[in-house]
Image: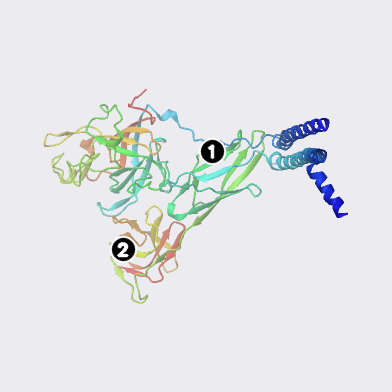
Amino acid sequence: MSNKTDDMKNDYSITPYTGVRKEQGHIGMTLLCSMCALLLLCSAGCTREEDNLIITEETWYDTISSVQDNRILEYRIGNVNDDYTIYSAIDDSTGTITVYLPAYYELGVIQAEIKLPEGTTISPDADVPVPVFEEEPFVYEVTSAEGLKATYTVDIVIQQEDFSLNELSRNPDSPVSFSAKESYIRVTGTNILGNYAITRGYLTNEAGERVYTMGEAQTPPTSRQIYLSCIDVEPGLYWIEITSYALTRRMENPINLR
Amino acid sequence: MNVMYTISTWLNRFSLILLACSLPLWFMACGGSDDGPGPDPDPDPVEDTTAVDNGMFYKLHRVENFAGDTEYDGPVDGKRAAIYFSLENKEGVKASYQKSNLWDLSFSGIANSDIDVNNGSVRSSLGYGATGVGAIYITDRSFEEVTDIPDESQFRYRVSLDENGAFGNGLGWALYDWGGEIVADASYEKQHVAYALGNPLTLNNGKNLVRTLVVKTAKGYYAKIKMISVYKDISDPENMMRNSTYPYFTFEYVLVPGDSETFEIR
């Protein structure tokens, strides 16, 4: 048996015939593999094509056909001279545009740059500035070329670091005095936004009501100090209140103008 | 044997041809998904653009009694709140618009006498941090004589009082006659009077002064400006007195597009 096997081995390995058989066997296998590969690839390709078509069609019809053009594609703050762009979050389902606004830009209005689908219009126009501090919400209405409408409400979220004031009077029972006729009062603290257009000082009464708007001084304000003037104020005790952009702080102890 | 060998060779070649043909078929099959049917993808968005009011260009505009910080009740040399003016829209602009390119001139400082421009890159500008590109140039030529837009290198960012009067430094748009003796007869009524220099003003020493401003606006247009008065309802220097109501600015200007080389009135 073993000899026969050896002979057969020899036959298979050295005789031309067996050699041909070997080649024939190889070609047969290659052909078979090629045919299988062809069928497999074609069928796989066709299956993939069908799969892709199904997926693609579903995806496209889901994302494009069901979303109309009465929408805002992009909303960003245009009046910031910076290296990067502040985009806002648009929620089509709730009709809101959330503007995250760092306080250090000191914006009183937003000049929005808006992208719309082709043919869509917006009202008010995109070049109408959006007030940052306004009781009434700012609302856009967009209209697609087909006449479909949608509204978007601008929600401004101001990101401002808290600021603090140092008391002018350390002892409430012994308030520091200034001239009621003319005084320039230096108020110190931290994280004050040093811009008189957005940082204002007021004299308030004990009940917290604003009774006098303090003026600007020659010295430019900084984040740590601001000079405010009092001219011809009724003598009495006052509590200084500072509004710096979106935040307001009031001193706990009064000053005495006399 | 030869026959078998020939057959095997042809079969071998055929298998290679089959393999070669199968690849494009596969690619075609797979490629079909990219070109499959369906609606066109999202159209290219169209950026919303701001319309420019071309009707403001090439015309002589006159602004009368543009009010400064008239609520100010402090000392004469105290700092007044800044006010803002848009040359493009020919109107005052609220202080809340400070960080925008919607204004071109600010009037601040003592009696609102510092004229600044809106430039987001210049720290001294009230528009610092925003997108304005404004600049200003002052010349001792008259409004009518100024026809060419100066070279960019001649612009700066602030113009104040003139060196021929009190508190002045270099060419300025107004002369402050502290004692009343520079321009007038030093009488009490003519003391502490400020004269805008847009129209020629003859001093007691014989000098004849005139100043014209050229402003690059926040959006890059150009304007030449003749400052006429800082007093309410008064344009004639003879009638400007210490008790005249101020600061109310009267001025004239011509606005041209940013790519202009000359000022024209059409």
In this view, the residue in front, A214 or B103, is B103
In the rendered image, is residue A46 in sight? no
The amino acid pointed to by label 1 is Asp
> Residue B127, how many percent across, how many down?
38, 46
The amino acid pointed to by label 2 is Ile
Question: Do the residues under discs 2 and 1 have CB atoms within 8 angstroms?
Answer: no
Looking at the figure, which quarter contains the C terminus of chain B?
A: top left
SS at mark 1? Answer: loop
> Residue B4, how many percent across, how many down?
83, 33
| A187 vs A91: above or below | below
Judge from the rendering whether residue A251 lies leftward or rightward of residue A90; answer left or right. Answer: left
Determine which quarter of the picture holds residue A71.
top right
> Residue A180, how many percent across, how many down?
30, 64
Work out how far the residue at label 2 is from the one at label 1, CA to CA, in angstroms. Answer: 44 Å
Estimate how packed mark 1 is, as few (under 14), some (14 to 19) or many (20 or more) residues with alpha carbons within 10 Å. Answer: some
Estimate how packed mark 2 is, as few (under 14), some (14 to 19) or many (20 or more) residues with alpha carbons within 10 Å. Answer: some
First in sequence, mark 2 or 1: give its number: 1
Q: Which mark is residue B7?
A: none
In this view, the residue in front, A130 or B188, is A130
Looking at the figure, which quarter contains the N terminus of chain B?
A: top right
Q: Which residue is mark 2?
A: A185
Determine which quarter of the picture holds residue A150.
top right
Give the residue furthest to the left. Answer: B205
Q: Nearer the viewer, mark 2 or mark 1?
A: 1
In this view, the residue in front, A243 or A55, is A55
What is the chain letter for disc 2?
Answer: A
SS at mark 2? Answer: strand
Q: Which residue is mark 1?
A: A125
